Amino acid sequence: MNSGNVFGGVRKLPMRTALIILASIALPAITTISTNAAPRDACALVTQAQVGAALGVMVKPGSYVTGSDKQACTFVPASPTDDFRSLEISFQSTIDYQIGQQLAAVAASNAGRDPFQASASVSGIGEDAYYRALGKDYTELMVKKGDAAIKIAIHGNLPVEKKQSIEKSLALQALAKM
């Protein structure tokens, strides 16, 4: 009997990895439920100039991820670059924030054992905030303010510390507009 395989050869995933995969699928599907919520425009939270200055590269104007839904905005480089592929800023519900925070706590408890994930609390920004890194080219900063939260995520080959610094800088600018 091979203890590393289940279901006829399919390898069993560690629980924390399965949770991260589940969250990456489920979190975007959860929508903010609020009857009094004002329309939110993620592209209005930071400017093209602010994003370009923070990243040190020229970027194209922000574009909405799903057409007319203004909850998420993506900035991409004006010219191809080896280090930076995209930056996304999006509104998140407080439920999304809390679920992500719980997953971040699981990641923190496994620190050093799983190179795929890492997390850390962040002070001095919003009411509450945390970083999460998934693999070596994706980081995100989640920040809660009032009944809303925002996520700033960078895809690229920049060092994690640099991505986190950029995310925090842009989040502080975005929070001023919320």
Image (spheres, rainbow, N blue to C red):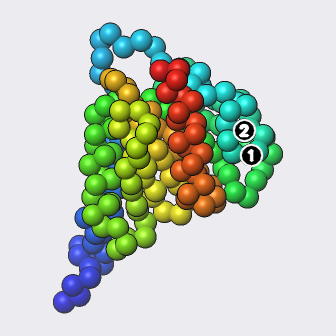
Q: Residue at x 80, y 45 (%)?
A: 79
Residue with the mark numbered 2: 52
Q: Is residue 28 visible?
A: no
Residue at the limit of the structure toward the front, as seen here: 124
Along the line of sight, the residue nearer the viewer: 105 or 38: 105
Q: Position of residue 100 (x, y in %)?
A: 33, 45
Along the line of sight, the residue nearer the viewer: 90 or 63: 90
Residue 1 higher or lower than 116, as above or below: below
Task: Report, in whole angstroms, how far the alpha carbon at label 1 lies from the one at label 2.
Answer: 6 Å
Residue 44 higher or lower than 9, as above or below: above
Along the line of sight, the residue nearer the viewer: 100 or 163: 163
Residue 96 higher or lower than 13, as above or below: above
Secondary structure beneath dot 2 equals helix
Tag 1: amino acid: Gly
Residue at the limit of the structure toward the right, as seen here: 79
Are dots 1 and 2 in contact, CB under 8 Å? yes
